[in-house]
Amino acid sequence: MAVSCCAACFEDSLDLRAVREPRLDVVIGSDGARRPNVERSHERALQTVVGEVRVSRIAYRARGQENLYVADGALNLPEEKPSHGLRRLAAIESPRGSFEDAQAAIGRQTGQRLGKRQLRELVVRAAVDFDSFYEQRQHTAVEEQDVVILSCDAKGVVMRAEALREQTKKQAKDAEQKLKTRLSKGEKRGRKRMAEICAVYELSPVKRTAADILPATDQERESAREGPKAKNKWLTASVTDDAAIVIAQMFDEAQRRDPERKRPWVALVDGNNHQIDRIKTEARKRKLTVTILVDFVHVMEYLWDAVWCLFEEGDPAAERWVQEKSRAVLDGQASTVAASIRRKATRLHLDPAKRKNADTCADYLLSKSRYLDYPTALSNGWPIATGVIEGACRHLVKDRMDITGARWGLDSAEAVLKLRALHNNGEFADYWRYHRAQERRRVHESRYAHGVIPRPA
C-alpha cells in the first residue's frame, strides 16, 4: 500500500506539471522540420522505484515526422519503460551477484519486477559511457615522492559458443575428447574467452633488501620492513577488447595522473611475453621510459617446480635450496642461479623427462633476466610482486563471472566487468551523473535543432 500511495503522489505531481506545461511557439527537430501542430495529453508509461506511473505531456507534431516531446527532455526520461532510478539499481545489484539475485534485490527494495532479459539489457545500456567517462576524468596529480605502477593480467571467462573468439571456437569444434563424460589430462573444453585486466595505482617508495623479503634468521625477521602500500587504485577490464587496447587505456590512465611524466613508472607483469611486448610498444609510441619487472612470486613458483627434479619429495633440503636460490635472484644473480640448476641436473644424471622442470626454470630465468633487476627495484623502494592485479583478477572477474553455471554473452559480460570496475574504483556515483547527462544528450538533445531542447521565452 505504501508503494502504491507513493506512486499515486508522484503521478499527481506529474499531472500537475502537465497542466502547467507551457506551449512553445517554435519547436524544430534535428531534421530541420518545424513542428507546428500541438496536442496535449499524450501519455507514456514509466516504471519507477515507487511503482508504475503515467506521464502526460504536450506532443509537437508535423506530418511525416516523429513527434517531439519537450517535457521528456526536461524530465530526462529514458527511452525504456524503467526509470533511471530502476536502471541505477540494476547497475548496482547486477555486478554484485547473479542476475537472479539482482532481480530479487530490486524486488525487495522497490516491489518492481524486472525480467532477466530486461535486466541484462539495462545493465548493457548502463555501461555504455565507461570509456568516455575516463577520457574526460581529471585526477589529482601524483605526489612528488610517489611512483606510478602499471600492471596487467588476463583471466578466462566461460562464454556461450557464439561469444567465443574464432580461434577458440575452431579449437573447441575440432577437439576430440578421449572420454565422453569427462575431460582427460591436458584436455580443455575450449569455452573460455580471456578478459584483459589492468591496474594503475601509486605508492610511496619503501627501500628494502633481500633480507626484508626472505629473512633467513630471527634477527632478520624481526627487523624486516613491510613493503610499500598501494593507494588510489584504478582498475579496468574487457572481454571484447584485446590486450593492445586495454594496455593503451592503462597508459592513458597513468598519463592522466602524471601528465608531465615527472614520476618513475614501473610495470609489474607475470612474465607473459605478449603483455611485455605490448607494454614496450606502447611506451615507445608515447616516448616514455617504463621499468618492467616480473613478479617475484612467479619466479619462486618456477624454482619450486624445479626443486622436485633435484630433491626427493618432502626433503627439507628442498625448502632450504629454494630459499637460497630465491635470495640469490633477489641479489641480482638470476643467470648464475640458472647455470647452477642446469649443473645440478647434469651431475644427477637426470634424463630429459626428469629434468624438464629444472630446464624450464633455467630458461625462464635467462629469458626474463632483464626484467629481474630486483636490487635496483628494492633500493628504489618499488614493489616486486603483482598482488594488486592478482587480487583484481579474483574480485573483479572470478568472484562474479565464475558463478557456478554462468555462461556469458559478449555484451553482458563486458557491461558487468565495466560496472564492477567502476564500483571497485569508487567512482560509480560520479559515473552515474555523467551517464545521465550523456543519456540526455543522446536521447533528447540530439532530436532538436542545434542539439538544444527549446524552453519557454
Image (cartoon, helix red, strand yellow):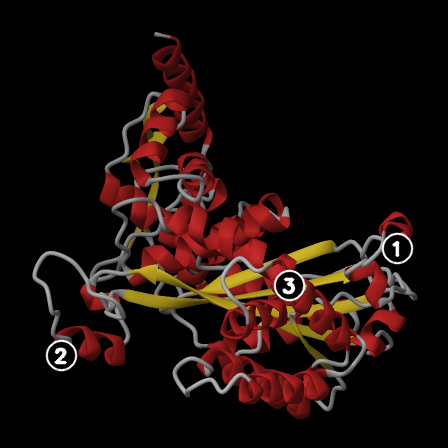
- Say if residue 345 shows up in the picture: yes
Amino acid type, residue under disc 3 in the picture: Ala
Q: Nearer the viewer, residue 110 or 203?
A: 203
Q: Residue 68, relative to residue 160: is it above or below? A: above
Q: Nearer the viewer, residue 455 or 351?
A: 351
Q: Residue 367, relative to residue 68: is it above or below? A: below
Q: Earlier in the sequence, mark 3 or mark 2?
A: 2
Q: Nearer the viewer, residue 413 or 159?
A: 159
Q: Which residue is mark 1?
A: 220
User: What label sits on residue 174 in the rendered view?
Assistant: 2
Residue that sits furthest to the top in the current view: 1
Q: Which residue is mark 3?
A: 317
Q: Nearer the viewer, residue 69 or 237?
A: 237
Q: Quadrant of the N terminus?
A: top left
Q: Position of residue 232 (x, y in %)?
A: 73, 54
Q: Earlier in the sequence, mark 2 or mark 1?
A: 2
Decide: marks 1, 3 in contact (CB < 8 A)?
Answer: no
Amino acid type, residue under disc 1 in the picture: Glu
Q: Position of residue 48 (x, y in %)?
A: 38, 29
Foreground tag (1 vs 3): 3
Q: How many marks?
A: 3
Q: Considering the numbered disc 1 on the image, is that residue within a helix, a strand or a loop?
A: helix
Compared across the picture, whether 325 is left or right of 344 comes to right
Residues at marks 1 and 3, CA–CA distance in whole angstroms? 21 Å
Q: Residues within 10 Å of mark 1 (few under 14, many from 20)?
A: some
Identified at 56% across, 67% down, the residue is 304
Q: Position of residue 117 (x, y in %)?
A: 23, 45
Q: Earlier in the sequence, mark 1 or mark 3?
A: 1
Amino acid type, residue under disc 2 in the picture: Asp
Q: Residue 89, relative to residue 13: is it above or below? A: below
